[in-house]
Amino acid sequence: MGAGIAQLGVEAGCATLIHDPFADVPKVIAGIAARWEKKGVAHSPPVVATEISALSTCDLIVEAVPERFDLKQETLARLSAVAPEAVLCSNTSSIPITALAAAAADPSRVVGMHFFNPPAVMRLVEVVSAVQSDPEALDRVCRLAEAMGKHVIRCKDVAGFVVNRANRSFGLEALRCLQEGVAGVETIDRIYRLEGGFRMGPFELQDLVGIDTGYEISLSFHQLSFGEPRWRPSTLSAQMTAAGRHGRKTGRGWYRYDAGRPHRSDDQPEPPVVAGMQVEGSGPVAEALRGRAANSDFNDGPRVVVDGLGGMIGTEPFYAITPLHLVEVTGPAGEAAFSSLGLHTARVSTSPAGVLPRAVCRLVNEAYFMLGEQIASPEDIDAGLILGLNHPRGAVGRGDLLGRQNVLTALDGLRELHGDAYRAAPLLRRLTAAPS
Ligand SMILES: NC(=O)c1ccc[n+]([C@@H]2O[C@H](COP(=O)([O-])OP(=O)(O)OC[C@H]3O[C@@H](n4cnc5c(N)ncnc54)[C@H](O)[C@@H]3O)[C@@H](O)[C@H]2O)c1
């Protein structure tokens, strides 16, 4: 992360130094130069600061040392002694900035500056205000991030800041569905990719990031929130961590990573349209199915009854969100009917909201918790998920697309079965009761 941030510093026109006593810094700088060469641009490389004291001339310093509270506190304390006038930024993803700032000689100069990986590519930066942060220091950090070409989200110092908090349920809901037997690992990943438009499924992503790392983050969320049920870590992650199945880096996680063998099979293209469908009901899923059926040359076919984010085909429940690409089905009738309409299907067990509608409703719900707590604006939440994590859509936008009433109904059904993790955000309920 440090190398990418230094690259951005130079590109923003700042005299930039790198200090890392444990890395081969000339090699890091050569890597940055190679990236510039590939892009066909020329810059003076960052300067190596062998001793931390060389940073005394800096106006602004970003720390990107490993994610350990004591190390970060110690680093900020040392930096504030070396450069007492500088604004000190932390690139932490999960440690409260307020607690880190307390270690600096002047806590008002400490600000969170959260880049996404890889920093030179991802367009988002979260600028996090600690309780002690001085507004001028925050403005300076925002101006620097903008000079680096970033979209800036200003946010409060809450667990996960805006983006990681908004996205907490992406992986947790997948783990809950797996544990409850709604579907298996590969099926859930395929559903997230094809139905949700995500580049990677949650289990593939956990394998990439490291299951142990993800588990640590989930523990920290739960601790920081004093046991919020929405963020209860999964016992499955604890087990995988204990078993040493940490993902790609250990050769095995949710998948096996054998050299020369893909960890999963390729997604097939959507099947051709060969039949129609009679659709009863209203709402976005019903409309999308009607649109598909009307586009086909057949206007009869099996009858489905749509109720919110899913419905029934004969005696089989099914689940879907829009835009419609894949339908989660619970039996052969759904499989035959939806695939003959040119849609992918995936077999899941009967549950209140299938796999993806459940996860998406949780994402929408979290966005409304954040809006109610005035943590970020709807635009920032959505920009954060799209630019920081490559989501195809933001959570507030998804809620509008699916209909807040449908989201609320799904959450209420889940709460009845699974408890308070699914309680609706007060603002979501209020706005749904009194639509504008
Ligand atoms: N990797 C990501 O996806 C990502 C994304 C956003 C934020 N972050 C955050 O960025 C920070 C760094 O993450 P990373 O993935 O680049 O870690 P990393 O382990 O790859 O790099 C950390 C670097 O810090 C150096 N270092 C260790 N102790 C030091 C010290 N006392 N002084 C100076 N340098 C020291 C190490 O030599 C290493 O080069 C963490 O806080 C992490 O949470 C990481």
Image: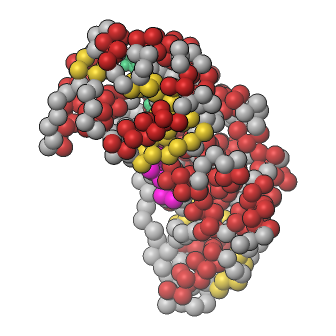
Left or right, 397 with reference to 88: right
For the C terminus, the image quarter is: bottom right
Viewer-side residue, 299 vs 94 = 94
Residue 217, x across and y down, in percent: 60, 30
Looking at the rendered structure, the number of numbered marks drawn on it comes to 0
Q: Residue at x 66, y 32 (%)?
A: 221
Viewer-side residue, 401 vs 342 = 401
In this figure, which colouring scheme has been used for the structure?
Answer: secondary structure
Left or right, 22 with reference to 183: left
Q: Residue at x 45, y 46 (%)?
A: 152
Q: Does residue 247 appear in the picture of this structure? A: no
Residue 21, x across and y down, in percent: 34, 10
Q: Which residues are magenta?
A: 386-394
Residue 346, x across and y down, in percent: 59, 60
Viewer-side residue, 432 vs 173 = 432
Give the quadrant of ligand 1: top left
Q: Residue at x 37, y 44 (%)?
A: 146
Q: Which residue, as the protein is rendered here, is positioned at the far right?
A: 416
Residue 120, x across and y down, in percent: 33, 39
Q: Does residue 196 appear in the picture of this structure? A: yes
Location of residue 128 by image quarter: top right
Left or right, 46 with reference to 186: left
20 to 292, vertically: above or below: above
Reply yes or no: does residue 283 show up in magenta: no
Location of residue 356 by image quarter: bottom right
For the N terminus, the image quarter is: top left
Q: Residue at x 54, y 57 (%)?
A: 379
97 to 193, vertically: above or below: above
